[in-house]
Amino acid sequence: MPRSDEPCTASSHAELGRVEEVDSRAVILLDTNVLIYAFASDSPFHTWAREVVADAVAGEGAAINAVSLAEACVGDADPRTVADRVRSWGVEILDVPAAAAEVCAHAYARYLKQRSSRTTESAPAMPLPDFFIGAHAQIMGWELATADRGRFKTYFRSVSLQTPS
């Protein structure tokens, strides 16, 4: 097994389901916070989030992945209806591609290394949801809409971000 700070090399990207080329659609992947702000009319980012979703849907498309769906369900008053509400906006719900695993793991290992140099507080051993979301956007070559610029800009530098002004 490779050390946690090294990229996984045991399997080829093809074996991990890597897409042959970047998806030609200009889908915008939505971070969980975009959904939360779009649902919450009292959020300071509510208008921004609703506009991001509407513009993406009117364009070539908007999507979330299963990780964002799970996060949104956890904080929602009626989690059984979250997927249907998201789909009613025209947002597609996608699985996280297996090829994102290596990118996610590598970015999270960098995070753990940087965190350990700044604090004695331990971090979760498993990657945080943002790392799966960022890795998904990166391998697909998609823009990511998020209100959390810092972590994505640090660990997924090649991902174009759409953030509130």
Image: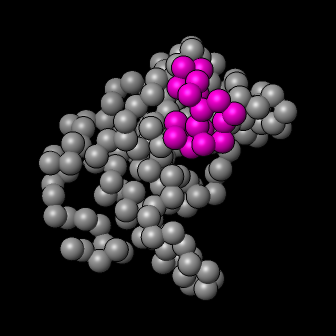
87 on left or right of 126: right
- Quadrant where the C terminus sits is top right
Q: Which residue is drawn at 58% across and 58% down?
A: 151
Q: Which residue is drawn at 61% across and 85% down?
A: 120
Above-or-below relation of 88 to 110 = above
**Residue 81 falls inside the magenta stretch:** yes
**Residue 9 falls inside the magenta stretch:** no
Q: Which of 127 and 56 is in front in this view?
A: 127
43 on left or right of 124: right
Q: Which residue is drawn at 34% across and 26% down?
A: 24
Segment tinted magenta in the rendering: 68-85
Q: How many labels does the image show?
A: 0
Above-or-below relation of 54 to 147 = above
Above-or-below relation of 9 to 99 = below
Residue 31 position in % (x across, y down): 57, 40
Q: Nearer the viewer, residue 83 or 46?
A: 83
Predominant secondary structure in magenta? helix
41 on left or right of 68: right
Residue 146 position in % (x across, y down): 62, 42
Residue 141 position in % (x across, y down): 40, 39
Q: Which of 17 and 126 is in front in this view?
A: 126
Q: Is residue 48 visible?
A: no
Q: Which of 104 and 80 is in front in this view?
A: 80
Residue 134 position in % (x across, y down): 47, 49
Q: Is residue 90 visible?
A: yes
103 on left or right of 159: left
Quarter of the rendering containing residue 1: bottom left
Above-or-below relation of 48 to 109 = above
Q: Residue at x 46, y 23 (%)?
A: 92
